[in-house]
Amino acid sequence: MNATVPRLVLSILSLDLPVRASRERLLEMTGRYREAESLAVGLVKALDAGAEAVCAVPSAPLRGALTALKKPLPVLARLPLTPPALDLREDHWLMREPRERNEAGFGLEGAAQRVALLPAAITGDVSARVAARIDQESGAWPTRSRAGLLLCAPVTDLVLAAGHARALERLLRHGRSRFGLAGLETRNPGWLLARLHEWGIEPDFVLAPIDPLGTAMTPDAETTRAEMQRGSVRLLASEVRGGGPTALEAGARDALDRGAWGLAADLVELSDLSSDLRGLAAMLASRSR
């Protein structure tokens, strides 16, 4: 499959996962896009304004929106699904067998699911277990909407901490076979970019928080920016406002100046969905000339 890494992505992860934003802003966004119809309208507006893809988890509103839309919606699927409630369990979520369907209705049916989980059950290999979950949770995802896989940060950073290069390679290969593109989400951009260079691993893209204040640029802003300057990995900068202190345009410009390939702007960061995305699209277009 010939696929191109998008440079401007609308993230709707804040509708389902914790992000750096005020409680009031989060409540406003979740209330506005709670219904599938309103979410579908917002996603169409985003694409018309210049967004090339949407980053999302498999959720009931998203499934309803994908069903309602008459044209394909390119989605970077953040998988496996890791809702905050998993943190309340004593056992790690990777040690539990996935259900046949999640709350959104995404998943494989009975026998097919059990066959997919068989290699993980036999070997105990973390990459096999994660791959089985990816298959299970993307089973009902429309093929026409698969723009790429975004391996979630809890998995990426676990494998990174373990120094398990082969597991990362296998997961990227698995993701490409299912979605065309395979990228990594991380909360440790400086460490990950350095290890990818050391291991000679080339994901199609990396999505990580980048902002002028270095709010979440682990291990520190200086190290992360130095790794970004290598330019060996296409990095989509997220959380460019650093949770609010930085203006969207200033944060986006700083990330691109530091070497970011593109931008992943979340709903909570956009004051006006269409206007802000058009501004970011124009900024990216001016740099590609």
Image: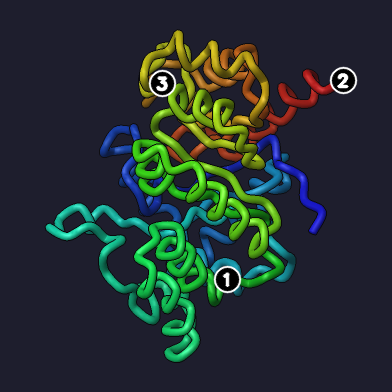
Calculate the distance from the C-alpha at mark 2 to the C-alpha at mark 3.
29 Å
Dot 1: element:
loop
Query: Can you see residue 246?
Result: yes
**Is 169 left or right of 181, judged from the image as shown?**
left
Which of the two marks, 2 or 3, is nearer to us in this view? Answer: 3
Compare residues 182 and 138 and report the one nearer the observer: 182
What is the spatial separation of the Cα atoms under label 2 and label 1, in whole angstroms?
36 Å
Cβ–Cβ under 8 Å for marks 1 and 3: no
Q: Earlier in the sequence, mark 2 or mark 3?
A: 3
Residue at the spot of label 2: 289
Side (left or right) of 43 relative to 36: right
In the image, is residue 268 above or below residue 282?
Answer: below
Label 1 Cα crowd, 10 Å radius (few <14 / some 14-19 / many 20+):
some
Between residues 217 and 50, which one lies in front from this camera angle?
217
Q: Quadrant of residue 196?
A: top right
User: What is the residue that sits farthest to the top in this orientation?
Assistant: 222
Residue hosting label 1: 141
Residue 103 spot, x, y in % from top left: 35, 73
Q: Secondary structure at mark 2?
A: loop
Name the N-terminal-most of marks 2 and 1.
1
Disc 2 marks a residue whose amino acid type is: Arg
Residue drawn at x 40%, y 44% is 159
**Residue drawn at 67 percent across, 25 percent down:** 232
Tell me the distance, in whole angstroms, between the alpha carbons under discs 1 and 3: 32 Å
Q: Nearer the viewer, residue 156 or 6?
A: 156
Q: Name the residue type under label 3.
A: Met
Image vertical order of residue 237 relative to residue 259, above or below: below
Assess whether mark 1 and mark 2 are in contact (beta carbons under 8 angstroms).
no
**Residue highlighted by disc 3:** 217
Task: Decide if residue 43 is in sight here.
Answer: no
